[in-house]
Image (cartoon, helix red, strand yellow):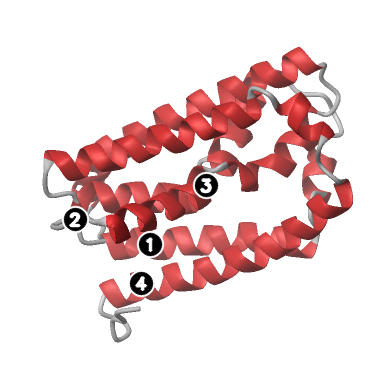
Amino acid sequence: MDFSVIDVELVLTLLVLLLIGMGPKIALVPFLEKTKHFDAETQRAVGRRMVVTAVITAIILFATGALLMRLLHISGGAVAVGGAIILAILAINMVSGPGKKIEEEAGAQQDPKHIAVYPLATPYLLNPVGITILIVASGEVVSIASAGLVLGLILLVGAFDYLVFANIDKVSKRLNPTGLVISEVVFGILLTAVAVQLMVFGLGSLGIIAATTH
């Protein structure tokens, strides 16, 4: 990511990556499975807590990402490769058995406050793509304006998440279970492609393969 020039392409690229990295889609099925035994008010409370936790974590990651990379002597490329591996595992699980593992984990009712933080806030809402993008962006921002852009987009995506999950009882009534499973598989395939691209970017940054411009 080149933050030296803030243009429409940069804004749209960041927005799309953050919608993948901390938007509602990946977290939606796990959320519905893990909260299906709760009443509507508890579901909404879990949704609000999940979103607030994810947004605060995202801001902290962005604020400290560059420092963490320096302290741990790791590069943006290494972060990208690590994020790609975790994302690929998550995506493959989405494709091979959508909701299956989540249903097994949700067999025993869990404390709403705990599941809102883990695993719903992370790694489902704020997932490996979001974590990777925020840490890499932290090391590459070059001005207050570019930092403000990233923070603004985090808050924008967070507001969208809040709108969805604070009204999850109304949203879930409009969801077709079959369509949700199909979209889960399709999105899992797309996420696998994102994981591959993230891996290529990371390996290119590390000089292991020839860097690509696309």
Q: In which quarter of the image is residue 5?
A: bottom left
Disc 2 + disc 4, Cβ < 8 Å: no
Q: Disc 4, disc 1: CB below 8 Å?
A: yes
Q: Distance between the residues labelled 1 and 3?
A: 13 Å
Residue at 34% over, 47% down: 134
Which amino acid, by three-letter code, is at mark 2? Phe
The residue where tag 4 is placed is: 201
Which residue is labeled 3 in the image? 127
**Which residue: 61% across, 67% down?**
190
Q: Is residue 174 left or right of residue 93?
A: right
Q: Residues within 10 Å of mark 4 (few under 14, many from 20)?
A: many
The mark closer to the camera, 1 or 2, is 2
Percent position of residue 183, x then y: 74, 57
Q: Disc 2 or disc 4, which is closer to the eye?
A: 2
Dot placed on the residue nearer the N-terminal end, 1 or 2: 2
Alpha carbon separation for disc pair 2 and 4: 17 Å
Q: Residues within 10 Å of mark 2 (few under 14, many from 20)?
A: some
Tell me which amino acid carries mark 1.
Answer: Ala
Q: Mark 2 points at which residue?
A: 3
Question: What mark, if any, has residue 158 been given in the picture?
Answer: none
Secondary structure under the numbered disc 2 in the rendered image = loop
How far apart in space, not on screen, are marks 4 and 3 (Cα)? 18 Å
Amino acid at pointer 4: Phe
- Residue positioned 64% across, 61% down in the render: 91
